Image (spheres, grey):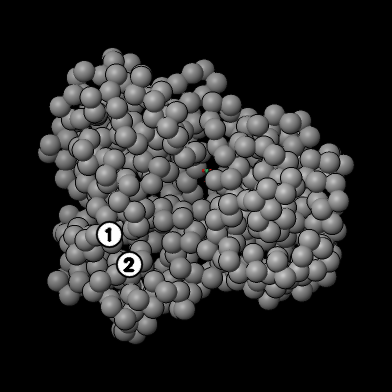
Amino acid sequence: MRLHPDRLADLPAAVQTPGYDRRSLATGIVHLGIGAFHRAHQAVYTEDVLNRDGGGWGISGVSLRSPDTRDALAPQGNLYTVAVRGANGERLRVVGSVTETLVAPEDPAAVLARLTAPGTRIVGLTVTEKGYCHDPATGTLDETHPDIRHDLAEPGNPRSALGFMAEALRLRREAGLAPFTVMSCDNLPSNGETVARLLRRFAALRDPAFGRWVEDTVAFPNSMVDRIVPATTDADRAAVAAALGMDDAWPVMTEPFTQWVIEDRFTAGRPAWETCGAELVADVHPYELMKLRLLNGSHSCIAYLGYLAGYQTVSETMADPVFAAHVRRFMDEEVTPTLPVPPGADLGRYKSSLIERFHNPALKHRTWQIAMDGTQKIPQRWLNTVRERLAAGAPIERLALGVAAWMRYVTGTDERGQPIDVRDPLAAQLRALADEAGPVAARLAPALLGVKAVFGDDLSTNPAFVLPVTVALERLYKDGAQRTVAAMV
Ligand code: CS2
């Protein structure tokens, strides 16, 4: 038996279900990138608003690549389960805020129709870092990206998030409809400003006057999003099915913690998310730096070093006291001095809560999952911190060890000689550089630092960076990740 709108009454009483009439739910949001993260985060805040206010803020979820999510959710009337797993057990709820799921490559016209519908007032994005088709080091549009070239050549039949939004905004402008607000929810620095810069450039390449119109009329609030959502496994599916008494083809697993800080700049209205836990603020910047550099920065350290040391998950890595101490010192010594403190925040408490969240053994968050797409993540997680530390003449030993661990990882062979399944848009280029340099730190480090899309012109050849990275990589080759971290602690 499958989860379905007609079977909500058959669920165990402990499972929370939608408290509003889904049949009269209108769609006000189109969300590009309807992955597990969106479903465990923004869609849950929106569900809470719907429970409170009812109304017109249903979500049309769009997959830009694969039909998997639609195939899982459509037979369930787009219902799905959120399993919140903490130290005190598990809480389940069935969420109903998603009204439809569209698969862009199958039917781009259907996506454009939804984006240009008068009721669409917000377009959200969780398309991951690489979905922005930008140069991660500079945050500018990668005009050589195959999807961007395609979407400029065939604007009526887009593939990329930028291509869809630009064509939809053009059509709305032509039809005299107000533009939607573009709300990026990805872990990018100044995500709103970044997508604004990219979309304006893309629009200007289509037509300079259109570029100016986007600049003048479209709102791009910045946001900071936070909730750990590991990929769902078959074991998770089985556990959820047992608890529900029916199958859910794609439940999402998450932690009790959740945070959403958004700039209140929505030109066409928004759900009252602030009534359900979101923080609406004038300036997201300090929150975003705190989260990207402390949480995601530590996550990437754990991912590469933990993986190399043979640990499968974040909590397994953190159960090794040497790694837990290293992560705390990375945060305290090298990251914290670079951070402005957000209004009302307590960085000490924030860091302790991160350590506790990373320890959560109920979440099986794989180091391999976080290690993915390093070239897209490293610049904002580590390298801006590195730049500020170097400018202040401060040490960067632990940051350098992170970069070295990433280098060791992307060679594609682990410490036991086993292959690593490296997933990254630049994987082939990294692999070729690694093969050419061989397992010699003094050759491999400069070769990989030459990837300008990651390290920029400034860090690529800066001896104050190259040297500590090379030294760290030498240690990793000689002693392995576990002993290198132990020696630093
Ligand atoms: C993680 C993030 O996969 C990753 O790179 O660092 O997805 C992280 O779990 C979230 O940003 C937490 O809010």
Residue at the location (79% across, 40% down)?
Answer: 482
Q: Secondary structure at mark 2?
A: loop
Quadrant showing the N terminus = top left
Q: Which residue is mark 2?
A: 159
Residue 421, above or below 435:
above
Q: Is residue 314 above or below residue 337?
A: above
Callout 1 amino acid = Ala
Gap in angstroms between the C-alphas marked 2 and 1:
7 Å
SS at circle 1: loop
> Would residue 159 appear left or right of 428 to someone viewing this image?
left
Q: Which residue is mark 1?
A: 104
- In the image, residue 197 lies at what x, y percent? 45, 71
The answer to whether marks 2 and 1 mark residues whose Cβ atoms lie closer than 8 Å is yes
User: 358 or 273: nearer the eye?
Assistant: 358
Q: Is mark 2 within 8 Å of ligand 1?
A: no
Residue 167 location (% of width, % of height): 26, 71
Residue for point 55% across, 37% down:
365
